[in-house]
Amino acid sequence: MSHPAPLKLYGFGPSRSFRALWALEEAGLDFEHIETVLRKDGSLPNSAKHPSYLALNAQGKVPTLVDGDKVLTESIAIVNYIARLAPESKLMPTSVSDLARYDELSCFVLAELEQPLWSKGKHLFALPEEQRVPAMLDTAKFEWAKAVRSLDALLEDTEYALGDHFSAIDILLAHTFNWAQRFEFDVPEKYIALRDRHFARPAAQRALASMA
Ligand SMILES: N[C@@H](CCC(=O)N[C@@H](CS)C(=O)NCC(=O)O)C(=O)O
């Protein structure tokens, strides 16, 4: 779908930027995907530490979405923005009651489910070496198992997380379980199946192909 200003998504491989890439594909919006490299020398023009990128995203992280003179960071804010630009995609609900559930689940993914994954990443490779605490890896495993048990209680055993159709919550869950598997966390079979089911969608396949 055409949009007055061409959207630009700065992202990197299977990182959190994949959530935004997939949402753009589901929404059918025109966009340019700008592959950005992480934790590399800031003199590289496509580095997230290059001064021109830091002017967009002061943390030097992905994703960043640029829409004309609007610059947006934070993967969930970006996914929500995309959903609002393309309401017909129904990625985000509209009723107060469904939005409350949407907020509950998206906050859970961000604050509880992905937190131990990122802890492991930080203490394995992302933090400066002298800041890494190896014992955090066991803590992350413990917190992951606890978050998954809480999710079991939060989700119903239905095809989609919200109502009777696919939404951005399914993107967040599928992406986060894929991340967990890549980082060698224990992922229950039913969440592997959730990831596989949603990754089989044509929009997810296009997003996966475009970052290859
Ligand atoms: N809360 C942010 C986190 C963004 C983030 O940490 N992105 C990682 C990739 S998944 C990154 O760019 N890391 C680079 C670094 O830590 O230097 C979001 O959801 O967008």
Image (cartoon, helix red, strand yellow):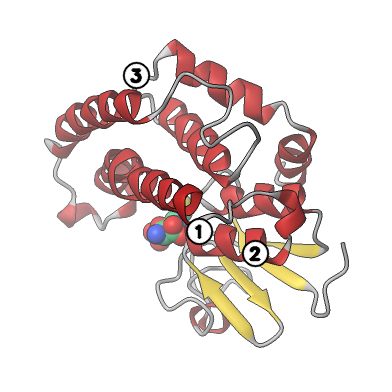
Q: Residue type at mark 2? A: Arg
Pick the residue in front: 202 or 139.
Answer: 202
Gap in angstroms between the C-alphas marked 3 and 1: 24 Å
* Whether residue 140 is visible: yes
Residue to which mark 3 is pinned: 186
Label 2 packing within 10 angstroms: few (<14), some (14-19), many (20+): some
Residue at image mark 1: 75
Of helix, strand and loop, which one carries label 1? helix
Residue 146 position (above or below residue 49): above
Which residue is pictured at 42% across the width and 78% down the height? 58
Residue that mark 2 sits on: 84
In the rendered view, tell whether residue 182 sits above or below residue 58. above
Q: Residue furthest right?
A: 2
**Left-right relation of 193 to 191:** right
Q: Position of residue 163 (x, y in %)?
A: 57, 34
Up-down relation of residue 35 to residue 180 (above or below) = below
